[in-house]
Image (cartoon, grey):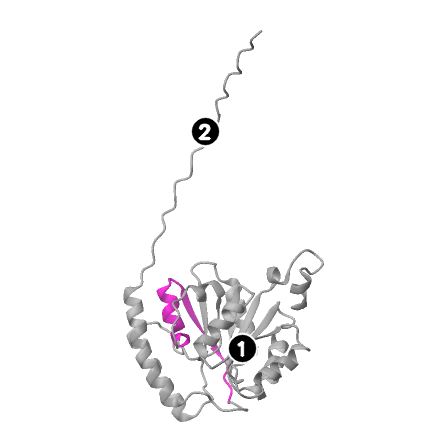
Amino acid sequence: MLGLAAVAAGADGRGHTLIDRMDLSIVIPVRNEAGNIAPLVAEISAALDALLDYEIVYVDDGSDDATAAEIGRLQHQRQQLRLVRHAVSCGQSAAIRSGVKAARAPWIATLDGDGQNDPADIPQLWQIAIEAPPSPPLLIAGQRRRRRDSWSKRRASRIANAVRRRMLNDDTPDTGCGLKLFPRALFLDLPYFDHMHRFLPALVLREGGVVRSVPVNHRPRERGVSKYGVFDRLWVGIVDLFGVLWLRRRGSRPQLLVAEPEVVPDTVPVPAPPELVS
């Protein structure tokens, strides 16, 4: 597979740049996840190397451990690997947005950096994406059928999801799953605010898109610690919910009229040649 070095060279020998032929950018926001970098990159490679052209865009959200150094070390081995860094932590939504803006492919897959999402699920989401019509735009959201988290975290998530679904009617059972796939252009059209990643389905529906939930694997965290407390997830999500309600009620999608085609006559009169003066 052609690597990122081809961008510097400009072409792959057949006149195509990597930007022209890349399929998917995988955006992974991380903060103090040094121990999870190498295992996750290896799993992504195992799942996708024979399937499509892709890049991995890590966004280091102000880590104070060896996260950036570990990514830098792996870049010498994996040409698909890229790094975007925040000087200070700005939160998961900001990290995802930075990664999407830096991405070079028309499709984006997001993964949590803690290793709980399974990269082996990406191919099934990708197959759905390439078989879908280009319009309306599609968000494919992972649904963790068997959560491998603590009881308190699962309980808080169920409460937040129930309140959100009742108020927003977004018909998405699990908006908190980090594994999602969507067009880059769709994401960049959405209104940005802190914690927006928790409400992507509702925002996509507001934009006239379609949301499809797909059952995916979920795994226990093996290394590192969670960066968010249980009550942080619950109360921040409920507070932001009212902001999303405000956006939905004031959103409007103009319907564009197709202009009438210009009528071109079958024959164009040819002016008579000027008279010759002897």
Q: Residues within 10 Å of mark 1 (few under 14, many from 20)?
A: some
The image shows residue 180 at horizontal and vertical percentages of: 48, 73
The image shows residue 250 at horizontal and vertical percentages of: 28, 64
Mark 2–mark 1 distance (CA, rounded to whole Å): 59 Å
Residue 21: name its quadrant: bottom right
Tell me the number on the disc at residue 232: none
Q: What residue range appears in magenta?
A: 196-220
Residue 159 at least partly seen: no
State the quadrant of the C terminus: top right
Specify whether 25 is left or right of 177.
Answer: right
SS class, disc 2? loop
Image height check: is 276 above or below 115? above
User: Does the magenta run of residues contain 208?
Assistant: yes
Image height check: is 12 above or below 37? above
Residue 229: name its quadrant: bottom left
Q: Residue at x 53, y 63 (%)?
A: 106
Q: Residue at x 34, y 55 (%)?
A: 254
Q: Label 1 amino acid?
A: Arg
Specify whether 54 is left or right of 87.
Answer: right
State the quadrant of the N terminus: bottom right
Given the current orientation, which residue lies at the most extreme top position?
A: 278
Q: Looking at this view, is 103 or 211 the one in front?
A: 103
Q: Label 2 amino acid?
A: Pro
Q: Looking at this view, is 50 or 215 the one in front?
A: 50
* Between discs 2 and 1, the one toward the N terminus: 1
The image shows residue 190 at horizontal and vertical percentages of: 40, 66
The image shows residue 96 at horizontal and vertical percentages of: 48, 74
Q: Residue at x 50, y 68 (%)?
A: 101
Q: Looking at this view, is 197 or 267 the one in front?
A: 197
Tell me the number on the disc at residue 85: 1
Reading the image, the residue beneath label 2 is 265
